[in-house]
Amino acid sequence: MMDAQTPKTLQPATDDLAGNELFFATLQEITSLINGGRAQETIFESVLSCALQMLHAQAVFLITVDGGRIRKFARRVSTDGQLHDVERYELPSHAGISRWVLLEGQPVHVPDVGADPRYHPSVDSLPGLRTSAVLAAPLKVRDAVLGVLVAVNRVQENMPFDLRHLRILSLLANQTAIAIENGKLFRRAEQLAVTDDLTQVYNYRFLKMALRREVKRAARFSQRFSVLMIDVDNLKRYNDRNGHLRGSEVLRMIAQVLVREARSIDLVAKYGGDEFVIILPQTEREGASVLADRIKMSVETTAFPLVPPGIITVSQGLATYPDNGLTAGELLESADIALYAAKESGKNRVSTAGIESSGSLRRRRDPHGHGPAESL
């Protein structure tokens, strides 16, 4: 079988493709790679290498289309049988025979590309390769076509591609499509595991892990970082008047404001109910205060459904490592107490742990039923 340890000299398979053990071993290997959760490019490399060997092709490439991104992964064999490394290309647009296969969802055998007006060399061939014949099969899962698998030229020019080769390519394309689809499902499952379904920011589970990791990193490198705990003011009253569906939309909009105002290195998470937490790496209290003030102004000037700007606001509690806690739980508790002080002093404001909140002894419980120091 051909994988990352494949020898650089290609050993062609026998011409009896129907009875070729390599064909079944190839399908078994690809299935094993898919079930093992291997990276897509590892699977692509195996598919390309095996297709070269089974079809006696000079080159094989895979075109994937994901949103507006079109990528090509290719392998070729030199005239002396040397197997080249995987080539990668970003295509600005899709055209040619492969585009026709993508749109129609049907495989095609083109024995003479010079006689086919669909042929587009920049897409249907590779740099430096003189293409004469093409096989192309769609990467199809149910009714969706995810890309195209293409074989170019046979090594033995006197033994051209035929329909048997197209069937082989189509079966490989089907397996590759399953690998791509499984990869998408796996990434989606990963995202759901760490994302709050309503607001699409990180969830409480991921927040706990990220905050512990940030504490360890800051302790190791003697750095500081800050935590903002944010509570939506007046949301209960808003829900009573406008319904919980509208309240959910407010939370989604608040999350969007937080993500927009935060830096790319900051982590925004849903803490529970109507509360959020932002972790600000390598940020002193003063820098965190600037972000908190920006969030405050942005929220109070936002027009939420059915109410004018200024009705929905946020109160915020700010805590900084190591001044206000040496553990994730202690930091959340300090930010929580500061948040309570901000609510008690009139809402729509920022309170800093150890300063404005120093007189408050109240310890609120987190939305999951534990005190912050106990839950982390």
Image (cartoon, rainbow, N blue to C red):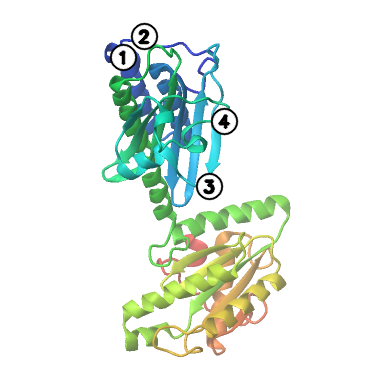
Callout 1 environment at 10 Å: few (<14), some (14 to 19), or many (20+)?
Answer: some
The residue to which callout 1 is attached is 17
Q: Secondary structure at mark 2?
A: loop
Q: Position of residue 100 (x, y in %)?
A: 36, 41
Give the residue drawn at x 70%, y 61%: 224
Q: Position of residue 210 (x, y in %)?
A: 54, 55
For discs 3 and 1, the disc positioned in front in the rendered view: 3
The residue to which callout 4 is attached is 127
Q: For residue 12, which quarter of the picture?
A: top left
Instruction: Using the rendered image of the protein, determine whether residue 189 is visible from the camera's viewpoint.
Output: yes
**Dot 3 amino acid type:** Pro
Q: Nearer the viewer, residue 126 or 272?
A: 126
Q: For residue 38, which quarter of the picture?
A: top left
- Which circle's residue, 2 or 4, is located before the other in the chain? 2
Question: Gap between marks 3 and 4, in whole Å?
Answer: 15 Å
Residues marked 2 and 3 touching at CB (< 8 Å): no
**Dot 4 amino acid type:** Pro
- Which circle's residue, 4 or 1, is located before the other in the chain? 1
Question: Gap between marks 3 and 1, in whole Å?
Answer: 36 Å
Question: Gap between marks 2 and 3, in whole Å?
Answer: 38 Å
Q: Nearer the viewer, residue 217 or 144?
A: 144
The residue to which callout 3 is attached is 92
For discs 2 and 3, the disc positioned in front in the rendered view: 3
Residues marked 2 and 4 touching at CB (< 8 Å): no
Residues marked 3 and 1 touching at CB (< 8 Å): no
Give the residue drawn at x 51%, y 23%: 76
- Which circle's residue, 3 or 4, is located before the other in the chain? 3
**Dot 1 amino acid type:** Leu
Residues marked 2 and 1 touching at CB (< 8 Å): yes
